[in-house]
Amino acid sequence: MDKVNHFEIPAKNLKKNGKFYKKVFDWKIIEVPGMPEYQIIHTTPVDDKQMVKEKGAINGGMFLKEEGDDRPVMITATVESIDRTIKKVKENGGAVTQEKTPIMKMGFIAYIRDPEGNMMGLFEYAKNNDVESISDGF
């Protein structure tokens, strides 16, 4: 069974929205050097590999929402293989909106839509032999 491991919140003003979540929920908002269009959100403490310490807890991010961007708040599921999951998505009436893409040295992401048009993220952890071939950025 694949688990939800991440969420993303769209925002037209990252700083203002980040302050909102900090003040309301006491979440830690982290600006990413060289990526002014994305912030990391920690809702729970992480270890030295940036993985959550508390079982069942998830962290997320906030992305800059541009004019015409219809992406909603989104959840991301960890899957063993994005390639296999994308195949199942297509076989079952879904669509791929972003193909498998490396993300930092952590792994890969992709985005899909279900048959109703709802968008969802997929995340695959990098295997040991993948890590060196993944760039530091998106």
Image (cartoon, rainbow, N blue to C red):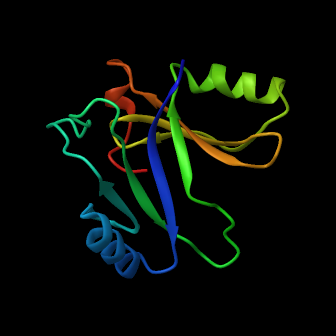
**Residue farthest toward the left in the current orientation of the protein:** 48
Position of the N terminus by quadrant? top right
Q: Is residue 42 above or below residue 38?
A: above
Q: Is residue 32 visible?
A: no
Q: Is residue 17 above or below residue 7?
A: below
**Closer-to-camera residue (105/3):** 3
**Residue farthest toward the front in the current orientation of the protein:** 24
Q: Residue at x 58, y 27 (%)?
A: 82
Q: Is residue 4 above or below residue 72?
A: above
Residue 13 x %, y %: 45, 80
Quadrant in which residue 51 is drawn? top left
Q: Residue at x 51, y 19 (%)?
A: 80
Quadrant in which residue 85 is drawn? top right
Residue 71 x %, y %: 64, 61
Residue 12 lies left or right of residue 51; in this view the side is right
Q: Residue at x 27, y 69 (%)?
A: 22
Residue 126 x %, y %: 39, 26
**Closer-to-camera residue (51/96):** 51
Q: Residue at x 62, y 44 (%)?
A: 120
